[in-house]
Amino acid sequence: MNEEDSSRTQFWVKRWEVGKLPWDLGHIPRELVAFLTRNQASQTGARVLIPGCGSGYEVQAFHEAGYDVTALDFSGPAVAHAREVLGPLGDKVLQGNFFKHDFGDQKFDLVYERGFLCSIPPTRWPEYAARMADLLAPGGRLVGLFLYGEEPEPPPFPLSDETALNLLGQSFRLLSSAESSGDSVPVYQGMERWQEWERKKS
């Protein structure tokens, strides 16, 4: 097994075990706070999924905004840490593989992306796009901070505009895109964009 393959659980388990967490912002990004403020009134009870949730800071933010939250990570140490961070909300964090986990028949209204897509080798990106399209209800949204640019020693694996359109354009349409305010970890600095993609209805 290649333990440096970021598509494998052990890659992330090792990093959590040694505390090598360069993606951990330590708080909720300003862009998410603004999004929740804009959408709070209309989203009460909406189902949101947070894949690759890491420390799970966003779980509480979505919960307090009225969302029905499910968070997922396939690293045992990450899940344990998130549950500790979240206390009573810890049961909203599940351990599992995003590509294989059984979420039941009900679709999500929203999926929150930050640091998940860019952690996956590009060879698996088509699986990501297909899974997102399958999990989101028509008209649902894939929103969050997406990484764009060049990275000489990935991961992370950034997108380009062309790659993003080819990847998501078949099932989604881009509603909005804005450069990050700079509230970012050093490894992502200057590369994040807040984007909102809508699941096409047909």
Image (cartoon, grey):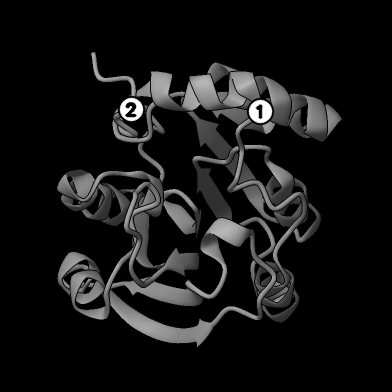
Mark 1 vs 2, N-terminal side: 2
Amino acid residing under circle 2: Glu
Q: What residue is rendered at 52% in x and 34% in y?
A: 72
Q: Is residue 104 toward the left or the right of residue 82 in the image?
A: left
Please give the residue where the numbered disc 2 appears in the rendered image.
4
Label 1 is placed on what type of residue?
Gly
How packed is label 1: few (under 14 Cα within 10 Å), some, or many (20 or more)? few
- Judge whether residue 194 can be spotted in this image: yes
Depth check: give the residue in front, 141 or 44. 141
Residue at label 1?
Answer: 19
Q: Tag 2: Cα neighbours inside 10 Å, few (<14), some, or many (≥20)? A: few
Looking at the figure, which quarter contains the N terminus? top left
Instruction: Point out residue 162 in the picture as x, y percentages from the top left corner.
Output: 19, 78
Percent across and percent down for residue 166 are 15, 71
Quadrant assignment, res 175: bottom left
Q: Distance between the residues labelled 1 and 2?
A: 16 Å
